[in-house]
Amino acid sequence: MRSSNPVFSRRGFTRGDSYAGFDAQGAQGAAGARPQGGNPYAQPAGNPYGQPQQGGNPYAAGPPLTPEQMEEMYAGPSAGPAQTGRMTMDDVVVRTGMTLGTVVVGAVLGWVAIPDRIGLAVGAALVAFVLAMIQSFKRVPSPPLILGYAAFEGIFLGVISNAYNEQWQGAPVQAVLGTMAVFAGMLFAYKTRLIRVTARYARIGMAIAIGFLLAMVVNLLFAAFGSSDGLGLTTGPLGIVFCLLGIGLGAFFLSLDFKQVEDGIRYGAPRNESWLAAFGLTLSLVWIYLELLRLISILRD
């Protein structure tokens, strides 16, 4: 059963070998590579994000905006896309709503129209995986790819959720509520700076995530060619530990998503990159939902 986020190395607002304004060594980029106070969108000579717009791009020079300045911008009158062309929180919210709405529509279709057809669910999951991987390697966000991923992922979730509900009544509702709780908790922790996303934090989390995925792949291989329970990572006490680890990794991915959104707004990312934010948030929420479904099934057994 597919229970992991297919894109560990999300582009988001990353440029080159850096993540969210940090280079691969965990420090701010060198002066030649990260000018103007570390703004990843203010590259010299050819950076399309650093060109003057409507009398000068305020993000093309000087240090990044302070939280107080960002609050003032949010409180002021909104500028239309033609005036700025930059990503806003409204853009992220709208695109995320569209992407998650497509997931929900697909899930309803999978639940009602194609119940008990696990083969079709697996096929939909594979199509969603391929679309997600294509988008992850593209240089620019593609709304059709992202919405197509959401639709097929939704069908997969609908069929799987129906199967779980027949075996463990109410499990999908519990998983949805749990996913919402994890999202709210991580958003609160990020906004209050209980969690600070740094390059080191990202590297450690990604290393754990890669180890988690490799362990699940090995478990699947043992289940296919050896013991039916594999290494026991999906059942019993060890299964509970791995489910909790998976949920924790989903929360980690959410923190990366929040950082990407914050940096994209602060540094004046192009408006269409809000689709990448919606894509990343959807991947993380789907991951958490699937891990919660597995956890609930183990606990109720």
Image: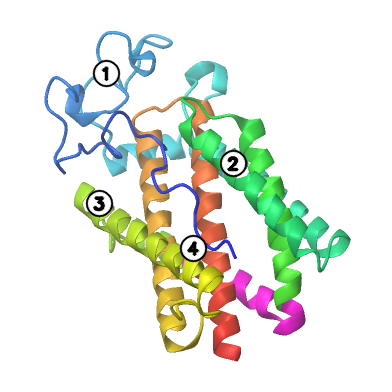
Q: Quadrant of residue 296?
A: bottom right
Task: Inspect the image, locate mark 3, and give the three-letter code of the amino acid beneath it.
Answer: Arg
Helix, strand or loop for disc 3: helix
Distance in Å between CA atoms under marks 1 and 3: 24 Å
10 Å neighbourhood of mark 2: few (<14), some, or many (≥20)? Answer: some
Tag 3 residue: 203
Q: Nearer the viewer, residue 57 or 9?
A: 9
- Residue underneath mark 1: 43
**Callout 1 crowding tier (Cα within 10 Å): few <14, some 14–19, many ≥20:** many
- Measuring 48% from the left and 76% from the top, which residue is drawn there? 230
> In the image, residue 247 lies at what x, y percent?
45, 69
**Do residues under tags 1 and 2 come within 8 Å of each other at their CB atoms?**
no
Label 1 to label 4, Cα distance in Å? 33 Å
Mark 4 belongs to which amino acid? Phe
The residue tagged with tag 2: helix, strand or loop?
Answer: helix
Residue identifier under label 4: 183
The residue sitting at 86% across, 63% down in the picture is: 112
Q: Position of residue 252 (x, y in %)?
A: 37, 59
Q: Position of residue 161 (x, y in %)?
A: 71, 69
Q: Earlier in the sequence, mark 3 or mark 2?
A: 2
Q: Is label 1 or label 2 in front?
A: 2
> Which of the 4 quarters of the picture holds residue 15?
top left
Going from the N terminus, do you reach mark 1 or mark 3 first? 1
Q: Nearer the viewer, residue 127 or 21?
A: 127
Q: Residue at x 40, y 80 (%)?
A: 241
Q: Which span of residues is magenta-colored?
A: 165-183
